[in-house]
Image: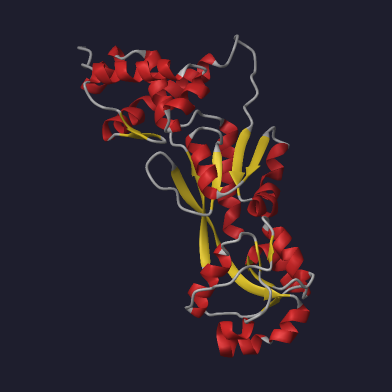
């Protein structure tokens, strides 16, 4: 039988230098020569030289240089899709150590909003710990965490915004419904029926508690439900929605919270909804990861469990 002739892409990849391909893949995933150099333990000039050598060999530009990193060209995206699987498989084999030695899986680095991590994600992932899964948790703002994901600092990120570009993939995780709440005392003074009749005018002069100075959740609620722009400063700013919840339940004022975060307080009466609109604001969170990232079976366990349990969030 005559052996089949390898296709052009296979021949091309066989001629390319393996070290250069590893460096290329690191830059493609990190979006930066500097970040890739840190990941590889190389100097930035070495990374730059290897990428330029690869570009000369291919005769095509792989990355467009930007003030804060690089943008992959279509040629780079095609090459990354071609070599990521084989290189990751080779990396897994070379990391196994001597034959017969079992190497524990690396910890899974999960990042996201502190409130969703603590209230939803960690309870859902707790059963995996008994199976040997190790977790490392980081909280922060979505844009910062997505940048860290591109730089390979995290394995998975729960994001409240949909990632853009082709360097990350994302699956819808859960929908957050926002609710306007107050303590029973403030609800009695304001009157939910007045809010339904008068809208934001019924809330004039009531202290607003929020997690950031620019009032992002409250501004969205006002625009979506009342159709007006929210103005004025917050009375209390707490950079954690759990702290916002506690302050409002104690009588500090009013706020807008994700419903999942205040379900117990709503059921017990510690917090009272000031309005139940037919069309409440909803925000979708996403579970993001880097396509072609090195295969850690525990990362797959964490990802699949989050996606499965989030259906009931």
The image shows a total of numbered marks equal to 0
Quarter of the image for residue 274 reads bottom right
User: Does any portion of residue 271 appear in the rendered image?
Assistant: yes
Residue 27 in the image: state x and y as whole percent.
Answer: 41, 27
Q: Residue at x 56, y 16 (%)?
A: 95
User: Could you tell me residue 204's position as x and y percent?
Assistant: 62, 82
Establish if 140 lies above or below 45. below
Colour style of the rendered protein structure: secondary structure
Question: Horizontal placement of 295 versus 9: left or right?
Answer: right
Instruction: Answer above or below: position of 83 versus 203.
Output: above
| Residue that sits furthest to the front in the current view | 232
**Percent of width and height locating residue 269:** 77, 76
Could you say where residue 261 lies in the image, as x and y percent from the top left?
A: 67, 62
Please report the residue visible at 61 percent of the width from the left and 34 percent of the height from the top. 108
Would residue 279 be visible to someone looking at this image? no
The image quadrant where one finds the C terminus is: bottom right
User: What quarter of the picture does the N terminus occupy?
Assistant: top left
Q: Residue at x 64, y 31 (%)?
A: 107
Which of the two residues, 62 or 21, is positioned nearer the viewer here? 62
Q: Is residue 52 above or below residue 258?
A: above
Where is residue 157, by image quadrant? Answer: top right
Left or right, residue 150 beside residue 238? left
Left-right relation of 6 to 306: left
Quarter of the rendering containing residue 201: bottom right
């Amino acid at each position: 039988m005559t052996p089949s002739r390898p296709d052009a892409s296979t021949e091309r990849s066989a001629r390319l230098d393996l070290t250069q391909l590893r460096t290329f893949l690191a830059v493609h995933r990190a979006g930066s020569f500097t970040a890739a150099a840190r990941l590889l333990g190389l100097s930035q000039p070495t990374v730059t030289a290897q990428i330029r050598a690869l570009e000369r060999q291919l005769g095509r530009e792989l990355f467009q240089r930007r003030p804060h990193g690089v943008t992959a060209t279509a040629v780079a995206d095609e090459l990354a899709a071609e070599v990521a699987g084989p290189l990751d498989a080779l990396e897994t084999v070379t990391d196994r150590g001597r034959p017969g030695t079992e190497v524990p899986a690396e910890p899974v680095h999960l990042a996201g909003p502190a409130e969703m991590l603590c209230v939803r994600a960690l309870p859902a992932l707790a059963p995996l710990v008994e199976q040997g899964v190790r977790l490392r948790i980081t909280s922060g703002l979505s844009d910062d965490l997505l940048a860290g994901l591109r730089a390979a600092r995290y394995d998975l990120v729960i994001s409240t915004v949909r990632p853009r570009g082709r360097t990350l993939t994302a699956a819808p995780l859960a929908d957050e419904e926002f609710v306007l709440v107050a303590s029973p005392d403030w609800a009695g003074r304001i009157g939910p029926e007045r809010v339904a009749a008068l809208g934001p005018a019924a809330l004039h002069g009531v202290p607003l508690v929020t997690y950031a100075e620019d009032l992002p959740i409250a501004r969205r609620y006002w625009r979506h439900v009342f159709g007006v722009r929210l103005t004025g400063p917050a009375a209390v700013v707490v950079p954690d929605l759990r702290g916002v919840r506690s302050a409002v339940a104690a009588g500090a004022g009013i706020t807008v919270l994700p419903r999942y975060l205040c379900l117990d307080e709503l059921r017990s009466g510690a917090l009272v909804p000031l309005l139940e609109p037919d069309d409440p604001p909803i925000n979708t969170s996403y579970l993001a990861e880097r396509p072609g990232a090195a295969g850690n079976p525990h990362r797959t366990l964490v990802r699949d469990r989050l996606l499965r349990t989030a259906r009931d969030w």
